[in-house]
Every structure is written in C-alpha cells, then in structure tokens.
Amino acid sequence: MSAQLIVSAIAPNRPGMTNDIVQLVQSFGATISESHMTVMSKEFAVIMEVTGPWNALTKLEHQLPVKAQQLGMLTMIKRSEKPQSNSAQTPYRVTFSNISDRTVIKDITEFFAENTINIEELNCRTLLSPQSERFSGEVKLTVSLTEQQSAEDIRLKFEQFCHAKSLSAEITPLKNS
C-alpha cells in the first residue's frame, strides 16, 4: 500500500539543487508525484508530494532532516492522505495581468474566500522596471467550483469585481487531460 508525505525545503540556490533533491527522495525508494520548485531571491524553494511504500517514507521521514542539513536545506515533512476523488468539482484557471498595485492580491484572495471558492494553487510574479522603478506583475490561480455553484453567477461576480478594481483578468475552465 502506498503512503504520502508532503515535503517542503528551502536552501541557498545553486546549480544542481533540483537534481540533489530528486536523487535524495529516490534514494529512499520514494517517488515525487507532484512538485513545485522555484527560485526566490537567492533561495531555492520546493514543496512536493512524495509517495511510496510505508517503509520507504518512514526512512525518508527519519533521515531526510540530516541529509538535507548536509545540503544546507531547511525542511518540513508532514504525512498526508490522498483526497477522496471529487468529480463534482470543476477546475478553472484565473489569470490577472498588468497588475500595478502590490496590495491587490489581498483583494483577489478575499473575493474567492467570500464566494466560497477553493484556491488550489496561487502563483504571482512581480517585476520592477530598473529604468522607471515601476512595479508590474501577474497572478495565476487554479480554483475549483462545486456543482452547487453556478459558473455563470461566479463569472458575473468575477467580472464585476475586476471592473470595480480595474483589473485585467480572465477565468477559463481547465480541460481534463
């Protein structure tokens, strides 16, 4: 029977860091089933779902902190379970572009919370123009609507929200692959 761990790690960025993490996880007989890796400032950050036999994950839980410290990583590990399949949810991609206000992300997350819409993933990227010191950015989310939520009602509220905040955005259903 397969078990799961959620592993997060932060370390100073350097070439080969991704390879080190993948090899470390696999050396215990575990597999990375999902991961998000990125560089922020000078730090490498990863959060991943690791699966495998219970004994491989137990070894990983006990030995990863020591091995990670040797690589200069701070880690956190949590046991988890596969969620029950909920085919009654429809995922949507939401993309906000040309954002010029750093505080708008609070308004965006508040909109989805107030409408009881689960944010499954949120990515934001900000850029600062060296010539003008002007800020611009984009925010991408994956959200899920239940079958009880009217997609048309949510779309209308979303358009009103974007208009009120002067945001350029789109919301589109994700296709099953």
Image (cartoon, rainbow, N blue to C red):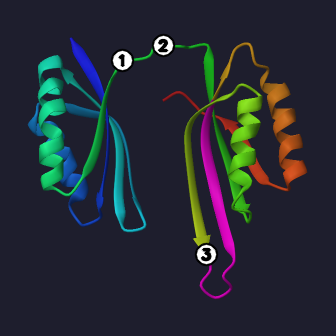
Closer-to-camera residue (101/141): 101
Are the residues at dot 1 and dot 3 in contact (C-beta closer than 8 Å)?
A: no
- Residues 42 and 94: in front is 42
Mark 1 or 3, nearer chain start: 1
Mark 2 highlights which residue? 85
Q: Is mark 2 on a helix, strand or loop?
A: loop
Query: Secondary structure under badge 3?
Result: strand
> What is the x, y in percent for residue 2?
23, 16
The amino acid type, in three-letter code, at marker 1 is Glu
Graded by Cα atoms within 10 Å as few (under 14), some (14 to 19) or many (20 or more), the crowding at tag 1 reads few
Q: Quadrant of the N terminus?
A: top left
Q: Tag 1, which secondary structure?
A: loop
Q: Estimate the x, y position of residue 66 in percent, counting from the top left.
A: 12, 44
The residue under label 1 is: 81
Which residues are the magenta region? 128-143
Name the residue rendered at 86%, 34% in the picture. Answer: 157
How busy is the neighbourhood of tag 2: few (under 14 within 10 Å), some, or many (20 plus)? few
- Could you tell me residue 35's position as x and y percent? 36, 41
Q: Give the vertical position of 47 relative to 116 (above or below).
A: below
Q: Is residue 130 above or below residue 34?
A: below
Q: In the rendering, at what x and y percent does residue 47 appear?
A: 36, 42
Asked if the residues shown at circle 3 and circle 2 are in contact, with their CB atoms under 8 angstroms apart, the answer is no
Which is in the foreground here, disc 3 or disc 2?
Answer: 3
* Alpha carbons under labels 1 and 3: distance apart: 40 Å
Q: How far apart are marks 2 and 1 (CA)?
A: 12 Å
Question: Which residue is identified by label 3?
Answer: 128
